Image: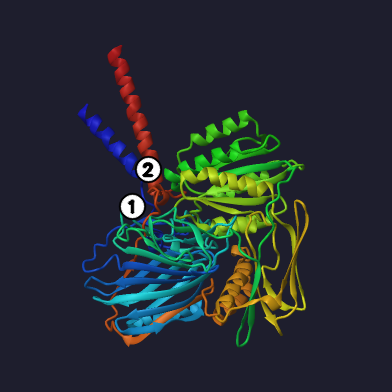
Amino acid sequence: MKTHKRFLCFLLAMLTFTIHCPAVNAKSIDDNANDTSKDKTAAPYFYVESEETGVDSFPLKKTDVTVDIKGIIADTHVTQTYANEGAKPINASYIFPASTKVTIHGMQMRIGNQTVTATIKEKEEAKQEFETAKSEGKSASMLSEERANVFSMDIANIMPGDEVHIDLHYTELITPTDGTYQFVFPTVTGPRYTGPVKDDTGNRDEWTAAPYLPDGTVPTAQYDIHVNLLAGVPITALTSTSHKINIDWNETTTAYVSLANPLEYAGNRDFILDYKLTGENISSGLTLSKGETENFFMLMVQPPERPSPSVIPPREYIFVLDVSGSMSGFPLDAAKELMKNLVSNLRETDTFNLILFSGTSYQMASRSLPATRENISKAVTLISEQNGAGGTELSGALKDALAIPQDEDSARNIVVITDGYISGESEIFELINQHLDQADFFSFGIGSAVNRYLIDGIASIGQGEPFVVTEASEASDAARRFSAYIQSPVLTDIQVSFEGFDAYDVEPAILPTLYAQKPIVLLGKWKGEPEGTIKLTGRTGEGSYTQTISAADALTDDGSTLGYLWARKRVERLTDYGVSGNDPDVKEEVTQIGLSYHMMTPYTSFIAVLDTVRNPDGGSTDVDQPLALPLGVSDLAVGYRAGSEPGDIFLLIGLAGIMLISAYYRKRLKKSRG
């Protein structure tokens, strides 16, 4: 009897272990024999302390962020401090996020009293130069873009006792929505689900094989953030929903924001700062800058007030809800609350459907259902039963949504609700791009550090709007805003014309339907004299709309900021969130933009090398700086992979064993009672 009990305890322990079993490190797979049958993906894994003595496994010691916001432009300086407190030379690698809208146009490396300003080079050329410097024993650093919002930092030959400072310079545009400005600084890259690659033609993203600390483990690195808000007009309603902050005021037009408790780790969730300015709205206007070879302009036009339409056409909503392992716990709880509010806000003339997805997907009904109380109750019950487990196969769920028979009298809207922790964003963007004639796509990012590249990309390509919900208490307001946006577009059929103002290379080239109450921003180049007018026309729910801006009334900008903002916008359109693929013409143009404007792109990297040989023996250890899991994200985000992994096999064995033991004891009990 004791033997059986011990065996049962062993199986239960094994089951508990395998449910939380970390993903196999893809690098170790590649080190094995070249077996083409092996899974070629690069998955996240749990960090395991190195057994090599004298090696500093946590070289990133501190991140300092300073942001100056003037008007609608945020200028950000980030300093990453690395140190080798071990006894052996190391090479460090670190994955970190940024906003999808930033232009990184400056980098410096400081070691002791030596400072090197990084140069921008083609990505492969920079990589070769870095590897050469590494092998020669020179200290070097390289910054590369893995996604529009994910970057990798590599540093070679950090000697014992070294303190290395990497200074990065970002610029981005901040525009208000419904009168509220929001500055977001992402601090951590969430683990990305990687489905199996079927053959060697599949692309691999090595950065996704990043180490993560288990849930609840606080990193030793410090994280500090300071924001200087220089508005020029009185600031109202300055708050942060993500962090506790201190605010020092200089009259009412300038605010200095800092973390209330710098010792509390702040690097496991997006830093979010919301504020309003007196008057609620931003004024329309034109800003011009003159350069040695090119002139740039930025036009900002405030759209009309949202109309109150008397007749709203019927709409079909297909909600695609992520119930994968990374959503387990807080994110799924917030998503449930959001979904309950979304379906409860539907009108009786609307129809809806629900698709739940993880490794596979489940469809509530073969056709979309009328938004009756009975059907809404059925959907709410189904949502409430979800717990969160498995992979994140979003593409299959979207294909299922698009395959649902469509009512020609209803406008179809597909609403994706997810944390976005996948690596195959380009597949999603391509799928949406191919079906723009069937639906508009909206996205809700759920969590404290969502993949905004995916969330923004779905809405940008799908001609919808993105939303982010960081906690369950925001669900009701987010659902309300969504309903207001989608039922009543602010401006449609938007056209821009230039009369006497010689403009070219204008971005964006095509303006989509404007759902949100936010300014229209145009960036471009101009020649000649600042004269003539720019006219914007469109249609509202109440008729035609026109605004005319005179070039003679333009403000002037003496810096290079507008050039960086234009270049970022052009690169975004050319790469089209990855839809353009590996088009050689696109690659050539984007590379040239990166080199010309000294900025980061998918095809250019920053490289800095100290000429001094500091590690002549060449011996050094590669260290991947482990990342913290985003706040509220469980170990299941790292510990599950699709396919036949050892954990999956052990799980099946454990379940089978428990079933056998259970049957055995039921038989023994029945026999003893008989």
Residue projecting furthest to the front:
251
Residue drawn 38% across and 58% down?
245
- Choose top left, top right, bottom left or bottom right for residue 559: bottom right
Determine whether the residue tagged by mark 1 lies in a helix, strand or loop.
Answer: loop
Using a 10 Å C-alpha cutoff, classify the residue at mark 2 as few (fewer than 14 neighbours), some (14 to 19) or many (20 or more).
Answer: some
**Residue 341 versus residue 602: which sits nearer the camera?**
341
In this rendering, position of residue 618 left or right of residue 532 = left
Q: Residue 512: percent from the left, percent from the top?
A: 69, 59
- Choose top left, top right, bottom left or bottom right for residue 374: top right
- Which residue in the structure is indicated by mark 2? 19
**Residue 646 versus residue 478: which sits nearer the camera?**
478
The answer to whether any part of residue 460 appears in the image is: yes
Determine whether the residue tagged by mark 2 lies in a helix, strand or loop.
Answer: helix
For the C terminus, give its image quadrant. top left
**Residue 351 versus residue 583: which sits nearer the camera?**
351
For the N terminus, give its image quadrant. top left
Say if 351 sits above or below 151 in the image. Answer: above
Indicate the amino acid at tag 1: Pro
- Choose top left, top right, bottom left or bottom right for residue 551: bottom right
- Please tell me the numbered disc located at residue 214: 1
